[in-house]
Image (cartoon, helix red, strand yellow):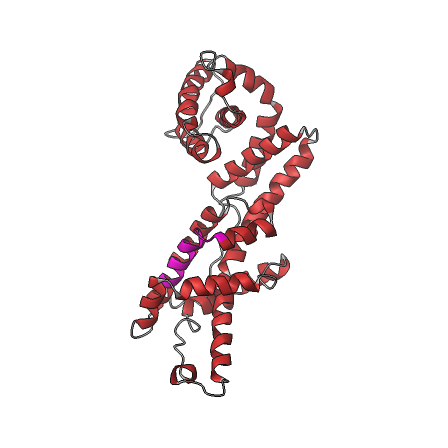
């Protein structure tokens, strides 16, 4: 399922786009936000089938090699360990995966060059060479190969370029999607005939969390910014970037709107997000301001947490 951190990032990006564009239709922006969440879930399936496409390409190459006028021994007797990888076969035969791919019209048919590039990068990698040279065929080896492949995908500029071309809504989603895929693989066993696909959300509360966080942050944006100014009066206003204030305001919306989310979780999440979506040093600034805001909001009775162990 999509992590709460990714959902928070989707919200703050939607807020940024809405405010910077001067949009005045909150519902339209919220619809775009939910579409970006749907696309993130699509990306799980899109990335999951990459090794399937690469294995098909590898098999086609092996068949063509056999048809040479003067094939070598290796051409006629290729190492089929990769094309017969049991985990890849499970993904390829998964009804859940294939149904989603068909319903959402996903796939890599338009990007054969990417498949060739990723294949080349794969066969040149040390982990692939070690896998192919290892005697015997073990399910755990098959799974480990794919785990290494998906981890390496995060460093592929070719893939980044194609994903950006396919959908602007996939910007920065890949690391979170790779984690989802690795979790799916970790639960896969040799006896399984179907890949257990995670649901889009961890619980029915997640869609409401997204919508409420977006709406509360936007409706109270001006009020939150006025509140923030009380704790940033000693800072050079020109050095406080827009994203810093937006993140703090969104954190305030979460602190005051979700009784079941611990204060510490909210603070930790937004401080981590600020490390990637604002300027160097922003996390320290945001941490300090939020500490003061939490103290003030708590004193005013505006932060109310319900549940055992919540503070």
| Residue 205 seen in the figure | no
Tag count in the figure?
0
The outermost residue toward the bottom is: 69
Which residue occupies the foreground of this view, 133 or 287? 133
Query: Where 24 falls versus 4 (above or below)?
Result: above
The outermost residue toward the front is: 70
222 with respect to 231 (left or right): right
93 with respect to 139 (left or right): right
Which residue occupies the foreground of this view, 279 or 43? 279
Decide whether the magenta segment is chiefly helix, strand or loop. helix
Q: Position of residue 266 (x, y in %)?
A: 44, 30
* Highlighted range, magenta: 144-157
Quarter of the image where one finds residue 33 = top right
Query: Where 39 falls versus 233 (above or below)?
Result: below
| Residue 76 seen in the figure | yes
Is 145 inside the magenta-drawn segment? yes
Q: Residue at x 55, y 19 (%)?
A: 224
**Which quadrant holds the C terminus?**
top left
Q: Position of residue 81 (x, y in %)?
A: 39, 73
Q: Position of residue 289 (x, y in %)?
A: 43, 19
Quarter of the image where one finds residue 153 = bottom left
Q: Residue at x 65, y 35 (%)?
A: 29
Is 299 inside the magenta-drawn segment? no
Query: Where 77 falls versus 25 (above or below)?
Result: below
Quarter of the image where one finds residue 99 = bottom right
Q: Position of residue 120 (x, y in %)?
A: 45, 65
């Amino acid at each position: 399922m999509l992590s709460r951190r990714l959902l928070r990032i989707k919200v703050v990006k939607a807020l940024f786009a809405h405010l910077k564009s001067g949009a005045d239709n909150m519902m339209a922006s919220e619809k775009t936000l939910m579409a970006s969440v749907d696309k993130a879930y699509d990306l799980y399936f899109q990335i999951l089938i990459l090794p399937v496409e690469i294995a098909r390409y590898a098999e086609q190459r092996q068949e063509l090699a056999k048809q040479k006028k003067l094939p070598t021994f290796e051409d006629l007797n290729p190492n089929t360990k990769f094309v017969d990888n049991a985990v890849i076969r499970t993904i390829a035969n998964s009804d859940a995966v294939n149904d989603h791919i068909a319903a959402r019209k996903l796939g890599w048919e338009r990007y054969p060059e990417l498949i060739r590039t990723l294949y080349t990068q794969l066969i040149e990698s040390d982990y692939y060479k070690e896998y192919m040279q290892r005697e015997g065929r073990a399910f755990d080896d098959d799974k480990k190969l794919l785990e290494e492949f998906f981890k390496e995908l995060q460093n592929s500029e070719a893939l980044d370029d194609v994903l950006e071309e396919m959908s602007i809504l996939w910007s920065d989603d890949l690391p979170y999607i790779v984690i989802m895929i690795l979790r799916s693989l970790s639960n896969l066993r040799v006896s399984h005939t179907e890949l257990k696909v995670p649901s889009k959300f961890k619980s029915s509360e997640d869609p409401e969390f997204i919508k409420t966080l977006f709406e509360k942050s936007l409706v109270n944006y001006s009020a939150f910014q006025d509140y923030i100014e009380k704790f940033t009066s000693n800072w050079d206003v020109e050095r406080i970037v827009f994203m810093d204030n937006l993140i703090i305001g969104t954190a305030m919306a979460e602190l005051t709107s979700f009784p079941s989310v611990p204060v510490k979780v909210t603070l930790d999440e937004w401080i981590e997000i600020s490390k990637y979506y604002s300027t160097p040093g922003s996390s320290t600034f945001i941490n300090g301001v939020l500490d003061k805001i939490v103290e003030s909001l708590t004193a005013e009775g505006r932060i109310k947490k319900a549940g055992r162990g919540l503070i």
